[in-house]
Amino acid sequence: MKFNSDSQGITKFIHALEDIQAQFGYKPQDFFILLEPTGGHYSYLVVRVLLDRGYSIYQVENKAVKDFRERQLGLNEKSDEIDAWIMAYMEWHKTLHPDMHSVRIVRPASAEQVLYRILGIAGYLLLN
């Protein structure tokens, strides 16, 4: 599922999730939503909206996706579509092998925690 990180795109995404819920009888807690942190204002907005609606959000670092793509799967090609498939595979693989250290999936407690994490990474990168 692809959507823009603006109010219209996020609304479209929420409506798609609600359609799935209605069709299959799911609840927000039944979804496993895995995102890459794409910068403070992009990921903060979508995480805030999803957490406010009761969805469980998980994050995986961009570098972890790249490393998994290259080291585990031997793929050097990169695109948003390929990375989305790889992230889904990473989540499935981590579910089967929870002790696997090559895939680190983080579950933020709040949208603010996502923002602080991004700011911390940005600060580290600015200093180094």
Image: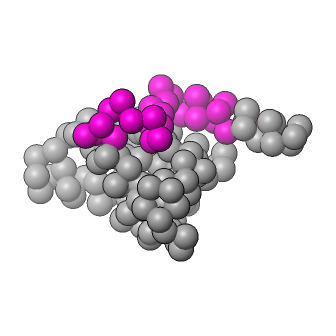
The residue sitting at the top extreme is: 109
Q: Nearer the viewer, residue 38 or 99?
A: 99
As displayed, is residue 81 above or below residue 67?
A: below
Quadrant hosting residue 111: top right
| Residue appearing at x 56%, y 57% in the figure | 66
Q: Is residue 81 left or right of residue 112?
A: left
Q: Nearer the viewer, residue 21 or 95?
A: 95
Q: Is residue 123 left or right of residue 83?
A: right
Residue 60: horizontal and vertical position, in percent?
Answer: 50, 44
| Residue appearing at x 26%, y 35% in the figure | 29
Whether residue 42 is visible here, answered yes or no, is no
Quadrant hosting residue 78: bottom right
Is residue 115 magenta-colored? Answer: yes
Is residue 107 magenta-colored? Answer: yes
Q: Nearer the viewer, residue 46 or 90?
A: 90
Identify the colour scheme used: one colour
Whether residue 59 is visible here, answered yes or no, is yes
Across the whole image, how many numbered discs are drawn on residues? Answer: 0
Residue 121: horizontal and vertical position, in percent?
Answer: 72, 38
| Residue appearing at x 76%, y 41% in the figure | 122
Q: Quadrant of the N terminus?
A: bottom left
| Residue appearing at x 18%, y 50% in the figure | 21
The residue sitting at the right extreme is: 127
Residue 35: horizontal and vertical position, in percent?
Answer: 47, 49
Q: Quadrant of the C terminus?
A: top right
Q: Is residue 32 left or right of residue 80?
A: left
Residue 84: horizontal and vertical position, in percent?
Answer: 42, 62
As displayed, is residue 108 above or below residue 26?
A: above
Tell me which segment is drawn in magenta: 94-119
